[in-house]
Image (cartoon, rainbow, N blue to C red):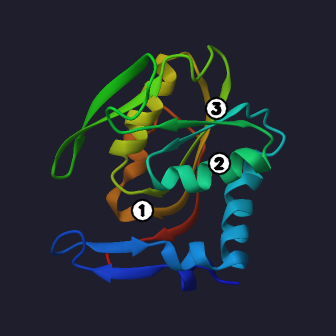
């Protein structure tokens, strides 16, 4: 099965000039979804992952399934005002402005082995913010797993301090 066949490209979304990689066709196909989860989780089997952290919102979809596959816990990294207890937050730059992410301050223990997960790595801004939050809590980031990497946007450069990026699908050009 070719997982690229289950990714729909939507042109000019969310704004003109962007070719959005829509994962919903993959999500609705049980075999494609199972394969994507396995391919994302497999490199981290036996690495002692204790916690998987996923970015809101599509990182939740893959993160919880990968956490289950690795017998690890799951920690959500959320947009502002979604977490009920004490939290750490970080503001970061987006292509079109700024955003903020938050994590519970007791979500990751110092030295705990963490796998970071999201659906897509583009410029790396969101993943870098997530990694910085986890590192701030003392987590040991073992790797970063994404379903899709847009390599032409050089997102790996933004998260260089956090080695071990694994992407299942790559796109080397817009479109």
As helix, strand or loop, the secondary structure at mark 1 comes to helix
Q: Earlier in the sequence, mark 2 or mark 1?
A: 2
Q: Where is residue 6 shown, x and y percent of the image?
A: 55, 82
Q: CA distance from mark 2 to mark 1?
A: 25 Å
The label on residue 114 is: 3
Crowding near pointer 3: few (<14 within 10 Å), some, many (20+)? Answer: many
Q: Badge 2 local density, few (<14 within 10 Å), some, or many (20+)?
A: many
Q: Is residue 56 left or right of residue 145?
A: left
Q: Position of 112 compared to 131: left or right?
A: right
Dot 3: element = strand
| Residue 129 point in image, percent of width and height | 38, 34
Q: Residue 93's x, y, as percent?
A: 22, 40
Q: Which residue is mark 2?
A: 64
Answer yes or no: do the residues labelled 2 and 3 have beta carbons within 8 Å?
no
Q: Is residue 19 above or below residue 95?
A: below
| Residue 85 visible from this viewpoint | yes
Position of residue 10 relative to residue 149, above or below, is: below
Snapshot quadrant of residue 4: bottom right
Instruction: Indicate the quadrant containing the N terminus: top left, top right, bottom left or bottom right.
Output: bottom right
Q: Could you tell which of marks 2 and 3 lies nearer the N-terminus?
A: 2
From the viewer's perspective, tell me whether residue 17 is left or right of residue 157: left
Of circles 2 and 3, the one toward us is 2
Q: Mark 1: give few (<14), some (14-19) or many (20+) Cα within 10 Å.
A: some
Mark 2 and 1 residues: CB-CB less than 8 Å, in contact?
Answer: no
Tell me, yes or no, whether the two marked residues, 3 and 1, touch with CB atoms within 8 Å. no
Toward the viewer: 126 or 174? 126
């Amino acid at each position: 099965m070719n997982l690229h066949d289950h990714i729909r490209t939507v042109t000019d979304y969310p704004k003109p000039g962007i070719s959005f990689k829509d994962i919903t066709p993959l999500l609705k196909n049980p075999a494609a979804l199972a394969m994507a989860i396995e391919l994302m989780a497999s490199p981290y089997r036996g690495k002692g992952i204790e916690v998987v952290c996923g970015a809101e919102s599509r990182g939740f979809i893959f993160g919880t399934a990968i956490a289950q596959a690795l017998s690890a816990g799951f920690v959500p990294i959320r947009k502002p005002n979604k977490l009920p207890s004490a939290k750490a937050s970080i503001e970061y730059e987006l292509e079109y402005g700024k955003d903020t992410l938050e994590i519970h301050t007791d979500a990751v223990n110092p030295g705990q082995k963490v796998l970071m997960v999201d659906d897509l790595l583009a410029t790396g801004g969101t993943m870098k913010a997530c990694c910085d939050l986890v590192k701030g809590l003392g987590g040991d980031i073992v790797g970063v797993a994404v379903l899709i990497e847009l390599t032409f946007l050089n997102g790996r450069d933004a998260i260089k301090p956090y080695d071990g990026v694994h992407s299942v699908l790559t796109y080397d050009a817009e479109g």
